[in-house]
Image (cartoon, rainbow, N blue to C red):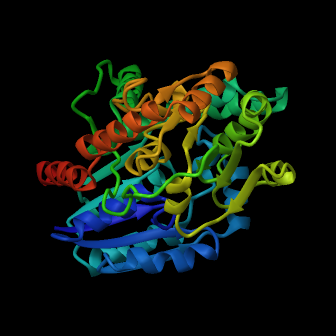
């Protein structure tokens, strides 16, 4: 098949879902990619995914135009996170690529590209599959619950009201909708039901995230004693919020018992508040790194302390694949089929989260059991080729 991938960013090992699906699908299909280019550093990242594509087009996103679109969207029911990414040139490139490369099916990811997909669908009459990835309305609802001030709560509430209606309509606009987990599938089906009176169970299908288990391989070397790691995109608010709260509420409880414990925060574009955490010599903030595997392989414990999350958390899957023991909040792993005490440790309140970390640092046999079970879980449930095969079966059913 000749497949067009439409995404609002450049797929990469950081933005892993479209990258790995394109990589797996390219073995048997011709992939054309059209992506928005939001900043200059993404240009270099495109060289990697380009190896798996027949063609690749990067459309620069004009920041001043994006703000104008947001201004125009204020009196409408279009959410700002959708309005910001609008581009007439982006739509025209999609149409051009469809005709030039004789595209047979269109695959669009995230609600940010929904307006472009709708226009394209009306113009070219091709089957379109929409990858929602997760339920954005649920994510905003969580954000509203943890908003730090009144102004933030008011803004999120207004955006949530728009998003519920917009997301429900978007789900019904396309031939198929896919999602990363059964948890989010239920949330999306409920949204569809508010519009059309049924659960939409046949409309929304699960295509889970995977892990490249050849790339994320356990390393047979001793881990650093008393070392913790958090690997995530640090310019993503829920990740930054999680680390700030962890360092404020949990880490002091760990240090009270084991004062030599060290924390490494790995991820691109950390905010000044995150960088300031490194004023304590026991905390290291790396910023962007090309390869997170050495940090995961050295750590005694990987952390996933998210309070707000949507979809499937690859940070948890990658740590499990590296056989690094994980302590996670229920929010961080609710989309996974993992069990507390079998594959990882799950805790929410600060004292319990600290106690779980201390258990793993002190109980070597427990840590080793989780290492083996965590890796086995990923191998059994999260293979990218399996996800690509599921996707292909959906493509064929749409043609």
**136 displayed left or right of 68:** left
Quadrant location of the N terminus in the rendered image: bottom left
**77 displayed left or right of 385:** right
Q: Position of residue 146 (x, y in %)?
A: 71, 26
Q: Position of residue 255 (x, y in %)?
A: 76, 34
**226 displayed left or right of 321:** right
Q: Nearer the viewer, residue 90 or 122?
A: 90
Q: Position of residue 121 (x, y in %)?
A: 33, 57
Q: Position of residue 150 (x, y in %)?
A: 83, 26
Instruction: Name the residue at 78% across, 33% down.
Output: 152
**Which image quadrant is residue 275 in?**
bottom right
**Which image quadrant is residue 382 in?**
top left
Residue 161 showing in the rendered view: no
Instruction: In the rendered view, tell whether residue 128 sits above or below residue 309.
Output: below
Q: Nearer the viewer, residue 243 or 224?
A: 224
Quadrant location of the C terminus in the rendered image: bottom left
**138 displayed left or right of 130:** right
Total numbered labels: 0
Instruction: In the rendered view, tell whether residue 137 sits above or below residue 315.
Output: above
Residue 100 showing in the rendered view: yes
Q: Nearer the viewer, residue 382 or 345?
A: 345
Q: Nearer the viewer, residue 43 or 165?
A: 43
Instruction: Name the residue at 62% across, 23% down.
Output: 355
């Amino acid at each position: 098949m000749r497949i067009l991938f439409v995404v609002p960013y450049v797929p990469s090992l950081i933005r892993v879902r479209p990258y790995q699906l394109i990589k797996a699908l390219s073995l048997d299909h011709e992939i054309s990619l059209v992506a928005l280019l939001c900043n200059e550093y993404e240009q270099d990242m495109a060289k990697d995914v380009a190896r798996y594509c027949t063609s690749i087009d990067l459309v620069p996103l004009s920041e001043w135009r994006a703000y104008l679109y947001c201004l125009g969207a204020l009196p409408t029911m279009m959410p700002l996170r959708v309005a910001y990414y609008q581009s007439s040139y982006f739509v025209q490139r999609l149409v051009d690529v469809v005709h030039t490369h004789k595209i047979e099916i269109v695959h669009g990811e995230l609600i940010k590209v929904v307006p472009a997909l709708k226009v394209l669908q009306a113009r070219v009459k091709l089957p379109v599959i929409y990858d929602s990835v997760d339920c954005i309305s649920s994510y905003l609802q969580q954000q509203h619950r943890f908003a730090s001030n009144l102004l933030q709560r008011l803004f999120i509430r207004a955006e949530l009201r728009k998003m519920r209606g917009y997301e429900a309509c978007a789900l019904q606009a396309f031939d198929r909708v896919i999602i990363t987990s059964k948890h989010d599938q239920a949330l999306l089906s409920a949204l569809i039901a508010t519009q059309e009176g049924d659960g939409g169970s046949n409309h929304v299908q699960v295509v889970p995230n995977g892990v490249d288990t050849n790339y994320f391989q356990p390393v047979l070397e001793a881990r650093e004693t008393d070392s913790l790691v958090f690997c995530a995109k640090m310019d993503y608010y829920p990740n930054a919020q999680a680390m700030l709260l962890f360092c404020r509420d949990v880490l002091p409880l760990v240090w009270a018992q084991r004062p030599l414990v060290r924390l490494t925060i790995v991820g691109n574009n950390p905010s000044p508040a995150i960088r300031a955490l490194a004023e304590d010599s026991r905390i290291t903030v790396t910023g962007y790194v090309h390869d997170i595997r050495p940090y995961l392989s050295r750590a005694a414990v990987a952390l996933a302390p998210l309070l707000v999350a949507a979809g499937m958390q690859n940070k948890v899957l990658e740590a499990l694949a590296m056989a690094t023991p994980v302590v996670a909040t229920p929010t961080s792993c609710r989309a996974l089929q993992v069990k507390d005490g079998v594959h990882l440790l799950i805790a929410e309140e600060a004292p319990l989260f600290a106690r779980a970390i201390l258990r793993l640092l002190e109980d070597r046999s427990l840590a080793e059991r989780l290492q083996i079970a965590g890796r086995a879980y990923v191998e059994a449930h999260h293979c990218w080729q399996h996800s690509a095969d599921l996707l292909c079966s959906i493509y064929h059913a749409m043609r």
